[in-house]
Every structure is written in structure tokens, then in C-alpha cells.
Amino acid sequence: MHGMRFSTSVPNDPDTHDDFKPTNKLENSQLTLKDIVEQDVKDNHVMIYMKGDPEQPRCGFSSLAVRVLSEYRVPIHSRNILEDPELKNAVKSFSMWPTFPQIFINGEFIGGSDIILNMHQNGELKEKIKATPSE
Amino acid sequence: MGVSKEQVESALRSKLSPSHIEVIDTSGGCGASFQVEIVSEEFEGKRLLERHRMVNGALVEEMKDIHALSITKALTPDQWKIKQQESAASQPPSTTTAA
């Protein structure tokens, strides 16, 4: 796949005990990364792929997006793309968007931090979040 | 290796023929992050997401070396005119962008 510059896979090493094998919480099923992204954005009303996590963003843009979204007091689901370069690439090709953070609301790709901030300021974000059906 | 402000500007000029463009290197000169303000007729009738996609698309090559791109404005010439009138009418533009 183009753009895949990193790999998290490790060759099988017969000397390695199971306990020491690298674990990846996204790897324990037959789902492809694309499936996982699809599932994420479908299952979570507000989904953000970011650098770091909402409690501890690792980039000013991710931090800004989280602060904006927090204003609306709705649950924010997130994944830290710094932990998984393959997920990062999967998200990028899913949304066809080159940078992070990336925000999805109600399954729809909204954009990055500039767009979120802009929509927050002009009231569109409120509408988007309000339109979110409650579970 | 970074990208120069001029490279970003010329890529945007050739692909989006803007009537106004301002590119700021926010990486302190190492060419890793930029802030872009762009006004183009080609944004007419397009949502902000679409406009940002056009800017990203124009910078596909450059984006490989850019770590952060902030598009602070992507306006049509009409919207730009209104913005300018607004800021001329008020005192020095009071930006409320978070620090």
C-alpha cells in the first residue's frame, strides 16, 4: 500500500515467549484497519483521531480540537495515531486528508482543527453535534 | 528537509489562482509548518471542507515535508471583501484565536 512507511509487524521469533510478544489491541481480530476506522466513525458520535489523547494532547492542533469539542459536553472518543503508524495511514486514506487531528461527527468527516474552530465560531458545529442522534 | 514559503506560495498560485494569498512559515524558518490565508474564485460554491481539500490537493508534493498546515482563511473574493470591510470598520482586529 502506498504511503506505508512504517510497519509495526515483528517477524515471528520462536524463542519469544507469548508473554513477550508485541501486543496490539487492534490486531486481535480479522478486521482490517480500514474496517476499524469505519467502525469507529459509525459507532461513535464524536470521533477524533489525534496526536496524544484528550487528557494529554501531544500537538497544539490536536489540543485545540479537543478544547473546542469539550465545549459541547458530549462524549469524545479518540485514538492516538502516534501509537500506531499503520492506523495513521489507514485514517489518512479513509478520509483522504493529510493531517491530524481528524474529526468525525455522526459518521461524517468534518475536517481538522482549522475547520472545527471555524465551525465552532460560526455555530455550525453546534448544529452538527445537536443533529447527533442520542443513544 | 523543509519546504520554503515561496514553494508553498507558488504551488498555491499556480493551482488555485488566488486573488490574495499569504503564507507564513510558523516553524521559525525550518519549513515544517505553515499558516495559509487564501482567497480564490475557485472556492465559490464550495464548503469549507472542500476548500481545504483543494488547498491540501494543491500541496500534495509539499505536504510530504510539511508537518503542519493551518489554513486560517479560505475565502471567495466576495467573502474577503466583506471581511476586510468588517475589520476596517472595527478597531485593530481583535483576534480571539486560542493561544
Image (cartoon, grey):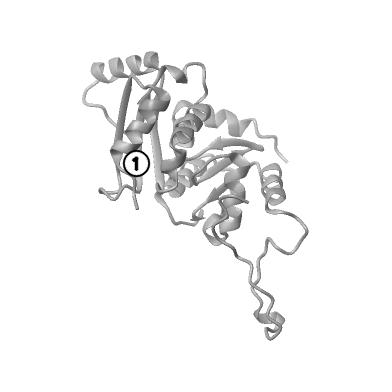
Q: Can you see residue A78?
A: no
Q: Residue furthest right?
A: A30
Mark 1, other Cα within 10 Å: few <14 / some 14–19 / many ≥20: many
As rendered, which of A111 and A94 lies closer to the eye?
A: A94
Taking B82 as reference, is A19 above or below it? below
Going by the image, does A44 lie left or right of A80? right
Coordinates of residue B87 in the picture (x, y in percent) = 27, 20
- Please name the residue shown 60% across and 36% down the image: A109
Tell me: residue B48, above or below residue A59.
above
Q: Position of residue A78 (x, y in %)?
A: 58, 51
As rendered, which of A20 and B29 lies closer to the eye? B29
Identified at 50% across, 46% down, the residue is A101
Helix, strand or loop at mark 1:
strand
Asked whether, in this view, residue A37 is left or right of residue B16, the answer is right
In the image, residue A114 sits, relative to residue A13, either above or below, namely: above
- The residue where tag 1 is placed is B34
Q: Residue furthest left?
A: B92
Q: Is residue B68 visible?
A: yes
Q: Amino acid at mark 1?
A: Phe
Residue A20 location, x and y as percent? 65, 80
Q: Position of residue B1 (x, y in %)?
A: 35, 53
Q: Which residue does the image show at 34% across and 41% down from the upper left? A: B34
Q: Quadrant of the C terminus of chain B?
A: top left
User: With B70 as the anchor, is A75 left or right in this view?
Assistant: right
Give the letter of the chain under mark 1: B
Q: Nearer the viewer, residue B56 or A3?
A: A3
Q: Toward which corner of the image does residue B58 lie, by quadrant?
A: top left
| Label total for image | 1
